[in-house]
Image (cartoon, coloured by chain):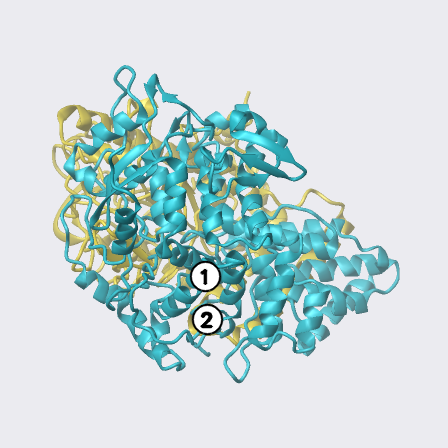
Chain colours: A yellow, B cyan
Amino acid sequence: MTSRRRFLTAAGAATSALALFPWLERRAKAAALPPRLLLYYTPHGTIWDQFRCAGGETDFELSPILTSLAKHRDQVVIVDGMKMDNGTDYYIPHTYTMPVLWTGSPIDTASSLFCRDDHMQCFGWGTGTSVDQTIAERLAPTTPYPTIELGYQCGNLHPAKRMIYTSPGNTKNPLDDPAAAFKQLFGGDVDLGEAAAARAELRQKSVLDAALADFNARRAKLGAADQSRLDTHAASIRSLEKSLMGSNAICEKPTAPTDITAETAIDRQSDLLAGIFGCGLTRIASFQLRIADNDNSLYPWVGLDEGGHHTLSHENDAATFATLAKLYTWYTERFVYLLDRLAATPDVDGTSVLDNTLVVWGSELGTGWTHSLDNVPFILAGGGSGRLRGGRYLKVTNTLTNRVLVTALEAMGITDVEKYGTTDTGSGGLPGVLT
Amino acid sequence: MPRAPFPPFRAALAALAGLAFVGCSGKITDKAAFQAEQGAGATGGAATSSTGGSGTGGQSSGMGGASGTGSGATGGSSSGTGGTSSGATGGSGPTACTSSASPGAPVPLRRLTAPQVERTVSDVLGVALKLDVDDERLGTYRSNISASVDAASARGYYDFAGAVAKTAELSRCESDCSAWLLDEVGLRLFRRPLAEDERTRYAALYEFALEDGTPAEAAQWVVEAMLQSPSFLYLDEVVKADGTLDDYAMAGRLSLLIWGRNPDAELLESAKNGELSSAAQIEAEVTRLLAAPESDAGIREFVDQWLDLARLDDPDVRPDLAELGAATVHALRDEPVQYFRRLLGNGAGLGELLTSSTSVADSELAEVYGEDLLKTSGTTAELDPKRRAGILSLPGVAAALSHAKRTSPTLRGKAVLTGLLCTPPEPPPANVNTTLPEATTGASVRERLEMHMSSPSCRGCHAPMDGLGFALEGFDWLGRSREEDNGVAIDDESTFPLGTEEVTVKGAVELGALLADSPEVAACVSRQWLRYSLGVTETRAADCLVNELATEARGTDGLEKMIVKALGSDWFRRGPEEAP
């Protein structure tokens, strides 16, 4: 039996969460049940003909691309008709909207950090803060990590390849390799004796505090942009400090991922996401599947074995659409696997992690073939701590994707925000999605 | 053979300076708006520099566009995805600037690259370990100027510092070694003496660890903290009253750049004594640093990235190289670096870099060279001047700029346009299929590319790019000389548009000779060196300096003078203007 299957079996066979994970009891006593948020990204929109569901708001029939969602149907809201505002006069497809997706704010067109000669345009990073980071800032969680970013094959630093912004121009790099992510998040020091462990903890804290003191001394001598970079570095050390202290104390580690291939890596990251939430490393996470400009990967196991995802998305014959539909169906299956894993992970109150999480799945545009932003597919899933009114296919018109961002804030208990991002014209969360 | 001799080529190179914006659609598009936007800040800088002033206006564009609209000097094309906008060609014509007194490069806070950290730690603490933190490469050269250190990178530094502390050479810490830590280790790691508050903190950390531990353990704690301090990981750029960097900052810059590691004790002593304050002092120091064997590291960083030699070690792009064996792949990648260093040390000018048939001997390459290797004597190798002349004809370069088991005239041509002419082609439009047409029986790479170029939408960019590359078709994907490709006799004579001229070249030797003679190439290589030196793209304010460096580069001792003068220039010596 592979270690992964052992892990799954152990998690799935649990009749009592508290029996399996005794440490949960300590946490249950320590805190009320926290809501969680997970932002999920796949590239290049969808094929709407195969994505759109027939029927009404509650009696809809799942479309071919979405069939596998059936078992989570009661915890899913599919949104049809949301529009993204790229917020700039000029629009370089994919690249200009990746920064918009979770920030609701346009890319910086005054900067010339990056240039695209084929469009004769220069641009910089996004000008907003992504909603997950805003929530983390507002809630100031005491978890080891304020937020955790995972991904798969997210590439080098470029606005089309990053989606999480801690502040304008400041992105977070996803951990996009399952093995490295495991090491970073769960690869704490090996088990030491009690005295040695105490000494090691004292060393960690003293050493990192000494280094942090140098940051304070140094930042005063810098300009604002450089100060911000140094501050982020210092914050990263503080997160590290917390996670080093915390990981031994509260967490049963998941098993290290094995058999990582292009076909399985996304599921391995989903295993880690379940472990991250289950172990309480953070309440706020994101997952970025590849990149916005351009995902030219091959997915031979769905029959996409030449041309690449992006290249194909620019063709409009029936055979290409059929191949792409298979890919998007596969994406849905990956999303369902994630929901399965969250559902199989016990939460402190004996419900599942999925029950207390809002998962938001989006893309950087609606349709690859036309680069249209008129209908960007979004799916909201999970229990949202009992607040998501699931089992619905929601048709909307004239609704900006910013509404979803406000919904995410509301789900996390932040209710004083009526609009989010500089492209937003306002009006709260998506109506009727949360109780 | 009746074909145009050299002059049209030369004219074409010069004409590149005035190259209009040719889109991949083949239509000439209006560049003015693009330029106006991109060059707004830089134009200010050029104007300021002409008065030798402080140039604050020029720095507003940050590391951005270096284009301008001045007559003769020209404007910035730029690299594509992931690239920063790159600078203009200097050109031989009159430029907008009239003085080489420039305002100083707009260098943001720079974090050391992973290899720089590794080498320094090896020097100071005697431990050779790998640092698992990624470096940024926004342009051609790795430079950590933009991204912040995230949790994963902080973890990388933490793991590295811990591992180093555990295995560091701390034998002198059998008894109290705090003075050594604060005075020597601290000095070497921070590239300057510790400030008072730093001394106090690190002494306190040492004493605290000592309460329940040994001096060796206390030393480990201090080392582990210093290795994660911003004073080690980021360059300290202290500016003196006259606007130039202070001597310690200069020592750090020079050493990290030329030796790829922190300054040694001698260089720090020079800084302490105020001996890095004038251009002449700096130039003398650069000469010393270049002559030392440690310069292998810095020159390697430059040459290796300039010619994209890392492709040789990337199994994703070159799965076919594994069967050559690690030693041969290493030799392929190393030879261009040693070729450059040999010329640098021998007083060569830029011309020889593109024409010399003398390389360094490496028995690992004998098989690749075959009959092209005439003889080796001692450390030098004499190559057949009819087939091998200049750095572009080295097997490592030809191999790096190839695909698996086939050559890529496109990659090779692009490297010439980007690295030697500073007129990088545009990336392919988002909606084109970049897969080459399937080979019909017996079709050579050249024939397939020419078939592809029959499409006008491809031709605009590919004609000059592939045209340059066809001249290098005499080398296969491993850099071996060859007579035929897939059964078709090699045709390495090529006619293609460059700038506004039609140009004909035959073979690598002729191409090298033509490039060697070009002022535009000299200007571009000077630009490349400036970009590497500062880790940012130069703005237009550097145009006059580039022209001066180009002139130096073409003369006796040209390569060394180009490097030395660049580092003694105001552009390099002056600190960033943006004070807090």
Is the residue under label 2 in contact with that under label 1 (CB below 8 Å)?
yes
Disc 1 to disc 2, how far (Cα)? 9 Å
- What's the residue type where badge 1 is placed? Leu
Percent of width and height locating residue B321: 50, 27
Q: Which residue is mark 1?
A: B530
Same subunit under labels 1 and 2?
yes
Q: Is residue A18 above or below residue B439?
A: below
Query: Disc 1: which chain?
Result: B
Q: What amino acid type is highlighted by mark number 2?
A: Trp
**Residue drawn at (66%, 73%) of the image:** B271
- Toward the viewer: A303 or A249? A303
Q: Chain of mark 2?
A: B
Residue A307: percent from the left, percent from the top? 27, 29
Q: Which mark is residue B571?
A: 2
Q: Position of residue A143 (x, y in %)?
A: 51, 55
Is any atom of residue B145 visible in this view? no
Residue A140 found in image quarter = bottom left
Which quadrant of the rendered structure holds the N terminus of chain B? top left
Above or below — where is B452 with respect to B243?
Answer: above
Tell me the crowding category of disc 1: few under 14, some 14 to 19, or many 20 or more residues within 10 angstroms, Cα based: many
User: From the viewer's perspective, is residue B269 above or below residue A206?
Assistant: below
